[in-house]
Amino acid sequence: MTSTATIADLSTAREVARQLRVDSVRSSTSAGSGHPTSSMSAADLLAVLVTRHLRYDWDNPGNDANDHLIFSKGHASPLLYAVYKAVGVISDEELMTGYRRFGQRLQGHPTPVLPWVDVATGSLGQGLPDGVGVALAGRYLDEVPYRVWVLCGDSEMAEGSMWEALDKAAYYRLSNLVAIVDVNRLGQSGPTELQWDLDAYARRAESFGARVLIVDGHDVDAIDEAYTSATNRTDDRPTVILARTLKGRGFSEVENLEGWHGKPLPAEMAQRAIRELGGESDLVVRGPQPPDEQPATRPAPREMPDLPRWEVGEKVATRRAYGDALTALGGGHPRIVALDGEVGNSTYSEEFAKAFGDRFFEMYIAEQQMIAAAVGLSVRHYVPFASTFAAFLSRAYDFIRMASISRANIRLVGSHAGVEIGADGPSQMALEDLAMLRAVQGSTVLYPSDAVSTAALVRAMVGLDGVSYLRTTRGAYPVLYDQGEDFPIGGSKVLRSSPDDAVTLVGAGVTLHQCLAAADQLAADGIRARVIDLYSVKPIDTATLRDAVAATDGRIVVVEDHHPEGGLGSAVADALLAAGAPTLRFTHLAVRELPGSGSTAEQLGAEGIDADTIAGAARALTS
């Protein structure tokens, strides 16, 4: 049967739910993989939502007034793609021949290669945190009454990130956020932790400040009432709808049985399921359109304002330069927003917060939620900068990885990196961050050594696509560059050079200053050293590195305040090997021992990344 409607009645919603189940079975069986039973449990929830409550212009997914639909349980992609067929934006042919096939857009888990998908999901525990960011934009920045609907699985409610999300949703009074939890009792390898104890889920959600509604997830009338209640609000709390469902609902051979997670039905079994569910159909039903309201008009970015000024030789911490530069840029670019993990007085994001409090979001000690909120804000076309101690970004690494898959444009800033921080000890010393961020698909990794380069790179980050990362240093070090110096992404700076250079020294951040001091020591011995500021770690300036090693007969010392794996040394070696450097005598100085507490000088010396050790390594290469 084929029909079209605007806002469907409940009987039509039931027919849509039946079709969604059938198409979830058909598509996964055709692909030979997928999660049909996880899709079947939530079919009624989605049918009611898309036919009666989701305000969405399906022909214009870029409409800023559209509601947002996020599948936090991204493995239920057969259901999502069946929804897209039911609203008429993909064909039955694409559903049956494009799902989970190489080169096709209906991937195993949703990604924004589809214009109706905001964020990539499938790594559980991330869709709801992302939704918080989208909802923040709606309430505080766009000022448009769109709603953010997030379908969650009960298994992922064991993830702490889900509770971080509810906590921040309540703190920021996100009444425009509705979490729909499909409580189907069965996880991948057996029953979930709480199974059908909806009262336990409710107590937890309420304790985080959410309003909770409990429904039979297969009672269309009850679902409709719950959605109506969630949207007709007078208070400022997010809503959590706990829906008791059956995994594999509608097919008696798998319904509520263990052992069917992530398994398509064999062809003959799928045919029995389709018959039991009532057969194939091609119903096309679209729900309500979004309201006519558009986002509050924010001024277009003006010409970038002047950056803060510093004099050569003035001692300034790059973390301080970040805060000052972001604040200056925020005055000319109204879509810049900032987030922090309760260390704003150390990252200096507090300077932005003081100047533009309506565009600053404190995420407290919830780094996963901070990254997710940045992703959600980027969905709404904002320019988010998220900062914390660099070491703590490791806690949120999966969110950073998924941000890349989401094609999000987010800017991360990690301060207090390396043993340079001194007495705080190893728990606070980011020694893995460059490796982590270099490994992210399409990332940009920047590591400035002074205030002028920091400010210039912050300005460059505003226009960057993808995930970008700026590593800043705790201590104050001399300004090396004149105001207005250009720092292109992918470039480097040669600070010392001569026709008689015998060795190349490469550093960034604190180690660049140590390289300069080592060059002075070497010069006193009659050894000329070329010194390179590798401020752009990814992309890297291969041409300058290749020219340097050619000029110094392959002798190069790379020094970094980072573990030897994956940082500056790896980046330089990869670049030179790929460029086919004919002769390479390579010394790599890095943090190889477990550090403790001590002064900066003691730490650098103990790890062999200070000026004396650098000079000694250079002498060894030139002897």
Image (tube, rainbow, N blue to C red):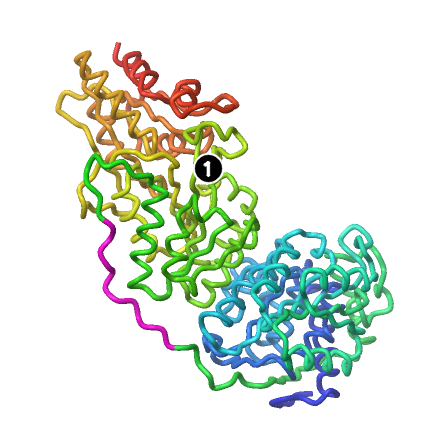
Q: Position of residue 486 (x, y in %)?
A: 21, 47
Residue position marked by numbered label 1 in the rendering: 435
| Residue 223 falls in image quadrant | bottom right
The stretch of residues the image draws in magenta is 297-308
Above or below 361: residue 177: below
User: Which of 147/407 is in front?
Assistant: 147
User: Which of 219/190 is in front?
Assistant: 219
Q: Is residue 341 left or right of residue 196?
A: left
Q: Is residue 479 left or right of residue 243?
A: left
Q: Amino acid at mark 1?
A: Ala
Q: Is residue 411 left or right of residue 299?
A: right
Q: Position of residue 139 (x, y in %)?
A: 51, 72
Q: Position of residue 437 (x, y in %)?
A: 45, 43
- In the rendered image, the quadrant that contains the N terminus is bottom right
Above or below 601: residue 336: below
Observer able to see residue 614? yes
